[in-house]
Amino acid sequence: MTFSQIALAILLTGLQLLAVILLAPFLSGFRSFLSARASGIAAPPVLRRWFAISRLWGTLPPVHHSDAPPLIGQFLTPVVAPFSLAASLCAALLVPAFSLGLITASWSDLTLIALLLVLARTGCLLPALTQPAEASAAAFGRAVTMALVLPTLFLITALLFSAGATTTLAAVLADLSHSNPLVNGAPFVLAGAALLAAVDPAPRADTEADGQSSDDALLMLTRDIVALTWLTLAGDLIWPGSLARIAASPTVLSGTGAFLLGLVCWLVRCFLLGTMLAAGRAFVIGSATSTRLRGAAALLLALLALQLLTAARLMPTETGQPADSAEADGPARETARP
Amino acid sequence: MPVLLAGALSATPERWIGLPPGQQRLACQSVWLVAAACAFAALPWSESHSATGFSIPGFRFDSAGSLFLIVFATIGCCAERWVRPGGRLPLASAAACLAALADHPASLMVTGSTALMLALPGRRNAAAGCLRALLFAAACAPGPLPASSPWMAVMAALLCATGEGRRTPDCAVAPLLEAGCGVLVLCRALLRPETIATPGMTALLLGGGMCLALCRIAIALTTPRGSRAIAGLAMLPVALAIMALGLLMLAMTEGSILTAHAAASVLTLDLITLWPIAAAFLCAGGLVTEGAGSDHLGRLGGLILFAPRLSGLLAVALLALTLLPPTGGFSVLWLLVETALGLLPDGFTAALPSLTFLLGLGVIVALSGLAVLRLTALLLLGSARSPRMAACPDATWIALFPVLGTLLFACLTACVPGGVLRLTTPFLTRLTGGETDAPRPPLFTLVGPDGLSSWMPLGVTVLLLLILLAIRLLQEQAIRARRSSTPARRDILPGITAGETVPWLGGLPTREPHLPFGEPLIWSGLDMAPSSLKAVLFPVRTLPFWRRAGLRHRTGRTLRRLRTLIALATPLADYGAALVLVLAALALCLTVLPS
């Protein structure tokens, strides 16, 4: 890589970081708004989440006028909250949001991204486990939901490997950018839909009043970034063609245009997927049923995607002969596999 | 030599040497760590006999031996107790170290069986321990049928990995030692030139490893006993090692040398980076049990309040065992997934076993995460659920030295997985049966068998730490700006000291700065983890037919009656036996008479 390419990659990574931090609370507020509307209750303002985080960001932690040692919650949250936010930001930097060619492209392994997001979400749940029984049971219920969806991610990794002979997300997405979502890109549309099961429901408006300190703002931001990263990942798999290739643009002007187009496409697909998820609130189902449905739907969609991918090799080509599996895998697989 | 020295130091009474109390134990732990470091440093030269100069009949210093020497030396370090001298587990570790270096089947059998017999559990589970020792000896024996030995080794490895957690803190690391002996004999059996890997054996290893991991984690999720839960989680690296050996055999059968090399790398990384963490975790769990005075998870809790040092190290080990990034456990998991993907056949039907394996790995990761959350909630968080737990003392740094040293060793090796693989090249070459075309691995990066996927633990860790530092700085800056702009809040209750009588408490004195029974909150019970899972996985609450028919109660009642009947008949048993003998003698006489 030349110096200009490295500088461009660093610039793009920084811009993506900024965009993710700015968009995550906004998207979360949007989802809360739509969810409340779908379930027929008073909807909070879209920007409420943003204001809650910015109000709490510089808030001092409450001073306890007591000689007693600090409680576990006060001890744990300052340790866990920055760590969770760092893990979620790290994962968000590894997923290409609106353009390819990030500086972190070679590290964007799908297993790594998925488990970093799981780590961040688990970190968010830890302070809730120090709460009384009702809150801790609810937190453990969310952990169970995450655990039910997690095995499916390994199947999606297998799908990615079958398509690109590697589990590096950026490389596979670069190969998939010209695929038709209704023909050879259909398995990835299903995989993206399976990934939507990993997105937590939008936070309720009344939970935003629970925050007391700056660390609570970090936890809220972490939850929003995790949800946005899952949505971005799903959107990448569903519509890989929307990712801009700025490094391949011949002029600065066309590069800027590609960047803006990629940004708009990212916003559109995130808000569309967020709307789809929020519409799920219209179905009145219990939390256990919802957990079951999410786990089962993710598993079935991933299996169907794998079956579709392998069935595509048997589809007749233009000459009427069945496609060879080695050809369908691409040249990279032939050279890389022993 | 350090192993022999550590064993001798451990067995020698303190009054013979004259060191101050505890110093001899510290010396033992240091020597164990030195032994592990020496074996690690000697790995590249382990196959050249002239360089090592180690020549005892029946023993030889080779690459496999030095690798297992690291494992058993770290186990020996964690087996040494600061508070109490001696104990049979350090001796068992010394015997296991000798077994690692054993070259002849007879020497392997004697030393390994000695280690297993020294690590034998209490009377109640002694039969299982004896069976493990017997199977180990049978797996070492050459026997008339050469093909039967690998099967025996597979069975021995699987059975040795089922060792239960010990209640006594002295024997906390014993399950890992037993499992290490099992994996050692399996590796030795695979390294024999006459061993032929069959599909059945491969399937047994892969399925057995998977079932073992699932069963141990299920136990960790449901048991009320702390030692069983801790041992269940600590056996996860053992199951991963067995699965890696299964994948190695599968890759060798398919003739894929690069994938076989990756599977051997999984085993190596697992032994060097994850097994020491499991040993440290077991050791820290033993310290918790000892400090809290109970093995029941329902009586523990709030360890962070009472023992911050011990709980900090326990939390680090727990984090590594969740197999989440950026720990060494994730490196092992990532390479295992890449190896399984490297063996993925074309076609959906043909790929179903591989997909099932990957799904099983996902289930293992998910369930181990839930088990870790459960242990964290019950052990570290919450409040003390018994007065004895509230008086749990924190361990001193000297007592925590083995845990700290072992964790440090594991963390350092986890940062340079490529370097570890470079050092263990002789072992990898020997395990895969010859030179591979794999390029020399980079120092800080793991590369998958496809050659395109890679994972760099140190890079991601540094990125994580940089982001963490930036967040902390921004947060501090925002808080400082807010503090300077807003006046300080008035102190509402100034100068209330402990023990002072205040009017709004009805004349009661304020509490001391101890919270013996924790915060006045209702803490979640033991059954939260299994009941949450059950509520999701088993939606219909229809009782099975045997519960509806009350079969369990009926069977139990019948068994109780039978036992009472047998107990009543015991005094008559002697008379009955005498009668039977007399009748037998009469019958013999009658048969002799006609002749």
Image (cartoon, coloured by chain):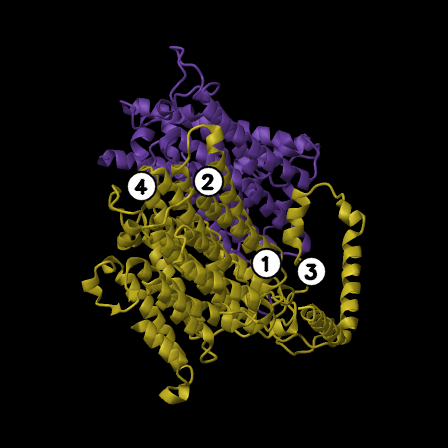
Chain colours: A purple, B yellow
* Label whose residue precedes the other's in the sequence (1 or 3): 1
* Label whose residue precedes the other's in the sequence (3 or 4): 4
Q: Secondary structure at mark 2?
A: helix
Q: Nearer the viewer, mark 1 or mark 3?
A: 1
Quarter of the image for residue A204 reads: top right
Above or below, B68 against B336 in this view is: below
Q: Decide: marks 3, 4 in contact (CB < 8 A)?
A: no
Residue type (three-letter) at the residue carrying disc 2? Ile
Q: Is residue A280 left or right of residue B134?
A: right
Residue type (three-letter) at the residue carrying disc 4? Ile
**Observer-nearest residue: B457 or A207?**
B457
In the rendered image, residue B77, in percent from the top left (x then y), is placed at 40, 70
Residue type (three-letter) at the residue carrying disc 1? Ala
Chain of residue at mark 4: B
Q: CA distance from mark 2 to mark 3?
A: 36 Å
Disc 4: which residue: B257
Q: Residue furthest left?
A: B50
Disc 1: which residue: B377
Q: CA distance from mark 1 to mark 3?
A: 13 Å
Q: Residue at x 40, y 63 (%)?
A: B407
Classed neighbour count for the residue bearing mark 2: other residues with Cα under 10 Å, few (<14), some (14–19), many (≥20)? some
In the rendered image, residue A242, in percent from the top left (x then y), is placed at 42, 24
Q: CA distance from mark 1 to mark 2?
A: 31 Å
